[in-house]
């Protein structure tokens, strides 16, 4: 259905690209002005719709800032939430709202990092209110590569290696036909480009795209598994403890390829699965579907992603007779010292 809709809307690609190019031109020439806020701002974003690893990067960079002795907070637009405007998600002590009101990715990041967090579509407005509500010296700005109204001290661009090698495919066309929010020429705005190979082997950049990365500081990212956790108790298990078990796989993320790949590599049976759309909103219908599939297939447990787990956790009562676990995935950076140096320098200016 989605593919058919994209084809129907394909004539609007030229209009979309023209609007984006004109908007970027106005920012580049200073016609549209950026606003600086009273904190160091590290922006993390991408050129595509989902699947580049922004949220794991937000979590990893926030934790790195804490190790460096900084006092970071996270600000996101809160995609998929059922609220609008500014909302403080967490302060220095606790989570203040629900996953539905804050978005799955922000709730997950706030819980994992234990730092002040907020959501707001208008980042300048959000940052100013955030800085009044909490005491932070750094803002990790999630999914803000295209949100150029707020000035940033470091602009990090996440790129999915697998996507880069799909040269010539329709996915590398602009929205709404393809998956690109902006063209590859917009890589020029990045201070650092993180090429995320996820669980795959590192590959050279496609010859066709090398010119866009010329002169850029490139960092290579990859995923590692941090174990499996009980959704209800947060008890930790080694991934090999699930080897050979027949689990019901529940997944609602943009591109489940990496999630399924790590299950396969660890010999976890994923033939029995329920794949939902990205940012799936779980309600009674989905919970009953999970229950039906679980019992009809005699599954040992339900195994899901961390992003899905934060939404399923509110159904602990409805799923109290089913063991539910999530696979925790973290991003690592190959050139870790160089990456840290790029972050450190903004505090020396």
Image (cartoon, helix red, strand yellow):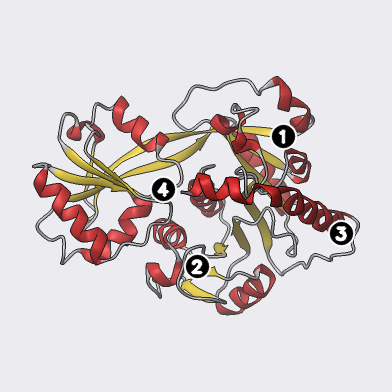
Q: Which residue is mark 2?
A: 116
Q: Residue at x 13, y 54 (%)?
A: 322
Query: Quadrant location of residue 169?
Result: top right
Q: What is the x, y in percent for residue 293?
A: 16, 48
Q: Secondary structure at mark 3?
A: helix
| Mark pair 3, 1: CA separation | 26 Å
Which of the two residues, 96 or 16, is positioned nearer the viewer here? 16
Which is nearer the N-term, disc 3 or disc 1?
3
Camera-side mark, 3 or 1: 3
Q: What is the x, y in percent for residue 209?
A: 72, 27
| Mark pair 4, 1: CA separation | 29 Å
Camera-side mark, 3 or 2: 3
* Residue 339 left/right relative to 308: right
Q: Secondary structure at mark 1?
A: strand
| Mark pair 2, 1: CA separation | 29 Å
Q: What label does residue 217 carry, if any?
A: 1
């Amino acid at each position: 259905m989605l593919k058919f809709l994209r084809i129907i809307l394909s004539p609007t690609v030229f209009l979309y690209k023209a609007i984006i190019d004109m908007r970027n031109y106005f920012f580049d020439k200073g016609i549209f002005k950026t606003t600086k806020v009273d904190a160091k701002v590290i922006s993390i974003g991408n050129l595509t719709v989902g699947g580049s690893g922004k949220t794991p990067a937000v979590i990893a960079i926030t934790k790195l800032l804490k190790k460096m002795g900084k006092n970071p907070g996270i600000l996101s637009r809160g995609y998929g939430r059922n609220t609008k405007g500014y909302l403080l998600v967490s302060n220095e002590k606790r989570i203040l709202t629900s996953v539905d009101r804050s978005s799955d990715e922000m709730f997950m990041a706030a819980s994992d990092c234990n730092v002040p967090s907020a959501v707001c579509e208008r980042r300048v407005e959000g940052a100013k209110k955030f800085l009044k509500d909490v005491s932070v010296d750094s803002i990790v700005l999630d999914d803000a590569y295209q949100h150029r109204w707020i000035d940033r001290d470091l602009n990090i661009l996440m790129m999915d290696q697998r996507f880069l090698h799909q040269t010539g495919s329709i996915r590398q066309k602009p929205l709404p036909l393809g998956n690109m929010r902006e063209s590859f020429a917009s890589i020029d705005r990045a201070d650092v480009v993180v090429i995320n190979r996820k669980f795959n082997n590192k590959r050279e950049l496609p010859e066709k795209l090398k010119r866009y990365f010329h002169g850029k500081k490139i960092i290579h990212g990859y995923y590692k598994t941090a174990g499996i956790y009980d959704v209800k108790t947060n008890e930790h298990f080694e991934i090999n403890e699930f080897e050979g078990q027949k689990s019901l796989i529940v997944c609602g993320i943009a591109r489940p390829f990496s999630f399924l790949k790590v299950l396969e590599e660890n010999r976890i049976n994923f033939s029995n699965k329920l794949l939902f759309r990205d940012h799936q909103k779980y309600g009674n219908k989905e919970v009953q579907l999970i229950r039906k599939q679980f019992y009809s297939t005699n599954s040992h447990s339900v195994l899901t992603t961390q992003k899905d787990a934060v939404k399923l956790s509110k159904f602990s009562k409805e799923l109290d007779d089913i063991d539910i676990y999530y696979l925790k995935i973290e991003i690592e950076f190959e050139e870790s010292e160089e990456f840290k140096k790029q972050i450190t320098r903004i505090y020396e200016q």
